[in-house]
Amino acid sequence: MDRSTNSRTHWNRRTVLGGIAGSAALAAGFSPVAARAELKKGGTFRVAKAHGNTTDTLNPGTYDNGFTISMSYGFSGLLSGVGTDGNLQPEVAESWEASADAKVWRFKIRDGVTFHNGKTVTPEDVIASIRFHMGDDSTSAAKPLVDSITDITADGNTVVFTLNSGSADFPFTFTDYHLAILPADGDTVDWQSGVSCGPYKIVEFNPGVSATLERFENDWNSDRGYFDRIEMLSVVDLNARTTALISGDVHAIDRLDLKTVGLMARDPNLGIHSVAGTQHYTFAMHTNKDPFTDVNIRLALKHAINREEMVEKILFGYGSVGNDHPIGEGQRFYNSELAQTPYDPDKAKFHMKQAGVDTLSVELAAADAAFAGAVDAATLFQNSAKAAGIDLTVKRAPNDGYWSDVWLKHPFCAVYWGGRPVEDAALTLAYSAGADWNDTFWENARFNELLVSARAELDENKRREMYWECQTLLNQDGGVIVPMFANYVFATAPDVVVSEQFSSHWDMDGERWMERWSFA
């Protein structure tokens, strides 16, 4: 059976500036049905997520894993969103329009949107919510996304954003799960209460353990939020997560054991879904720490990894080979002409010699909290690197606290990225100089210059050239190894009605399962 089907929607400047844009949507399910059951209200939905840390908070600038991302999409209101077809759609903002140079954007705020505490959402709340992530003192992971904003003002029920340069994709900025609309509180926002304006309201949140949410009866959109109650569990252990689904304790789980997906698919009581999108797994090198300061060492390690073997043995075919940048084949500015970096021990030795060393010893930290099979992937890397004279030691890190204690701290570690619906966001969040989530600490003047220029460029051909060069720079100079793009593979119980088409930029239907699914 085919594991993926492809459909591509082409974008142009007119559709983007008009507020509607499409991206590639790649999806397939193992258990297709002839007709989708009707969505209906009711029931308590339980889900076990392979994410969650005891250090998680309700501060939207700190969300960094699948648990907090899906929780954010469930209880938070956003100005705009990404539909299951990859198109941009209005949410708290009912419409938007841009100046001819895409430097000034006007977002009309929808009437009748209320917070969970009953307060009406105003333009002032929107302004405070976005400003929360801005400024030199901001510690928000979304700060790079809003750095181009120089001013925000209210004009009646319209919020006006002025940028330092044009941005053709600006409305996509507000689809990011960090940019929740929260109640204004003086010069900041009230995030501690967990009040926002999404389809669900938080009843209880135990970081790294669980969260309980209930449907918000006064949600502005009656065509979402079908469950009465949501119970989310943080279950990082794969076996425990799988057992919870098979035993009926939960109705859905993410990040299946790819070794046993085939067997699970034989169970008529399970719905197995595989969606190809922007998710990719990486090994991040801190380019500001030796030996990774030397580009030849970075290139040696890139040539010392057998990508095809990883796709076969870690993803079991549910994915594709990566090429050391975050842009997937389905995205509109994917560099189709960039040569694939091959597994070549001799080439690795050549670069080591250029760096002045005959042998190399490095430590790679990994845990399955990074991605399913991360420790096994690191071990495969260890074995393939031996042929190049590289002694790669695998440091197995604890799952709990991996994102707070290892990521961004250990100079070489395993990471997963869900990707973003547009190239600018993916490249800016993870690779622009000074970005909080730049986990390779890579700084390349030309790359950063291209990012700013491409963001403002309205000529599609010129923009494509810039993003292609960005991918080339990452491939040849960057500190990230992207060995593989991984399908999102998740499972649901037989009484769960899912979307006819899944969003492909995050796991479990773009992590918007909470508002889109229901019981049969």
Image: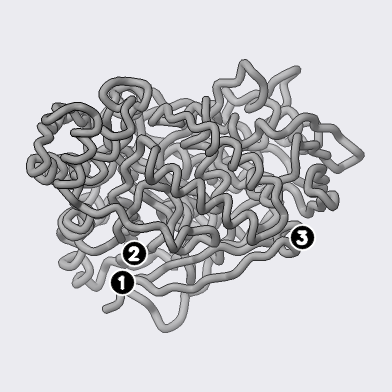
Camera-nearest label, 3 or 1: 3
Q: CA distance from mark 2 to mark 3?
A: 32 Å
Amino acid type assigned to the residue bearing label 3 in the image: Gly
Which is more N-terminal, label 3 or label 2?
A: 3
Residue pointed to by mark 2 = 274
Amino acid type assigned to the residue bearing label 1 in the image: Arg
In the image, taking residue 245 as reference, residue 142 lies left or right, namely: right
Residue visible at 23% across and 46% down in the picture: 303
Q: How far across and how far down the image is residue 222, in percent? A: 66, 58
Camera-nearest label, 2 or 3: 3
Residue visible at 36% across and 35% down in the picture: 479
> Marks 1 and 2: CB-CB under 8 Å?
yes
Residue pointed to by mark 3 = 18
For mark 3, give the secondary structure.
Answer: loop
Considering depth in this image, is 23 or 87 the residue closer to the camera? Answer: 23
Amino acid type assigned to the residue bearing label 2 in the image: Ser
Residue pointed to by mark 1 = 3
In the image, taking residue 124 as reference, residue 402 lies left or right, namely: left
